[in-house]
Amino acid sequence: MTLFSTAGLFIALSLLVALILAVIVITPWLRATRLKNNPVDNQLLDINVTVFRERLAELKSDKDSGTIDDSHYQNQKLELERQLLDAQRQVAPMINPGVKSRLIIIVWVPVMAAMAYLMISDRTPVFELWQAEDKVGQVADDLLTGKIDQPPEWAIEDGRQLITAMQTNVHRHADDPDRWMRLSELFLSLEVTDSALEALSRAYRLSPDNEEIATTYAQISFFANEGQLDADSRRVLQGVLRNNPQHEGAQMLMAMGEARASNFEQAQGWIKRLRASIAAKPGDHTRALASLDELSANVTGQQQRAAEGVNVTVSVNPSLLPLVKGDDVLFVAIRDVNGGPPFAAKRLPISVIKQGEANISLSDIDAMIPERTLQSARAAKTQLAVIARISHNGNASAESGDLSGNPVVISADQKQVNVEINQQIP
């Protein structure tokens, strides 16, 4: 296929429509030539006839009511007829346009339509899309339908064309979950995680019972959220486990997510469940079981370190709740009152706040720098403060419009603290 196969068809159809419009414009002129050599514009005459009839009706009404006699009625009627004849003689003949004028209209309507299309905005992206579809459109379709695993070398000379063709193909088959799934794989290979998640979410909505799509969606979302299971990922995994309670991938993600959320007992429960499932299968699973034992020990160590940390209850002032958006991010940190990097910090999805409140644990597990821990700060008798902020853009640095609270100073051995988010940064 060539570029003309798409662009040429578009131009031909556009020209045909423009010509039809031009013919419609000159059709009244073509009809007029068949009436008379010197056709008369009857519009004014029709108006005069209407006026004549109205005035005649008024005169007859006056005569019937006795306002005027029969002689006066006849005189006025003759005067009206004379005025009507004079007006008819004064009507100018309509000028019939020539062939040249008609040809000008037929030519200029398509020309001006084309100029308007090209000059109103830049059409370069449209032409580039057509070119991409003609060049690699079939390759894109074969990739998205699984007919081929790798594109030919000539098709990836311009990677942007192939990506554009694949996106266009998927949107034309928007009800096909497998195409969305393969498009997400393309985005993941390009490290465009947000677009991959969007494609996976569409695939999941189209086919929520597909275990592969569901677990892939939950897994990518889990790692994109820095090891946090948000409400959507948790719901997806629960759906997978409801249909297949022995699904090992979903169990592992639940265990890791619960551990990251400091729900250590739930994490250990998922690990035990997964271990029992693997041990019950025939074959040698020594390495897998050893890996689970290591994960269990790691969770136990995290639980011990978390016990030495600080439990933070973050509440949002009711007056600020309308300002909280679904894609906001909650930052909670413990830092030196004099400034510097936090000793412990967490970046959490806003969904952790339930009914205006969230309970969060901060400990050495959440240290940003290995040697800068909460225990080291307490050993050095550093005065610490807990801060909490809701970011609209997800940035670690405070910005105008973010919601925050006043820092709360804590003592060296304090294990519990309440922080209220009660103001908006100007």
Image: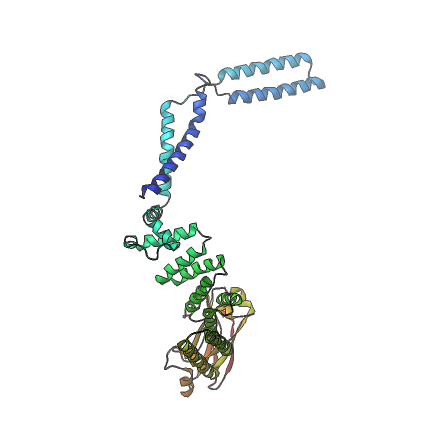
- The furthest residue to the front: 282
Q: Nearer the viewer, residue 181 or 400?
A: 181
Establish if 426 lies above or below 165: below
Residue depicted at 44% across the width and 26% down the height: 27
Where, quadrant-wise, is the N terminus in this rendering? top left
Q: Nearer the viewer, residue 258 or 376?
A: 258
Q: In the rendered picture of this protein, how many numbered marks are placed on residues? A: 0
User: Residue 215 or 231: which is nearer the viewer?
Assistant: 215
- Asked whether residue 335 is in view, the answer is no
Q: Position of residue 111 (x, y in %)?
A: 35, 35
Using residue 356 as the reference point, say whether residue 124 is left or right of it: left
Residue under the point 62% across and 14% down: 77
Q: Residue at x 38, y 22 (%)?
A: 98
Residue 124 located left or right of residue 32: left
Which color mode does the image show?
Answer: rainbow
Residue 316 at what x, y percent from top left?
A: 53, 71
Of 108 and 194, nearer the camera is 194
- Figure quadrant of residue 260: bottom left
Measuring from the top left, give residue 416's x and y in whole percent: 51, 81
Furthest residue in direction top, as rendered: 71
Answer yes or no: is residue 249 visible.
yes
Please state the horizontal and vertical placement of residue 393, each as a whole percent of the image.
43, 65
Q: Is residue 342 above or below residue 325?
A: below
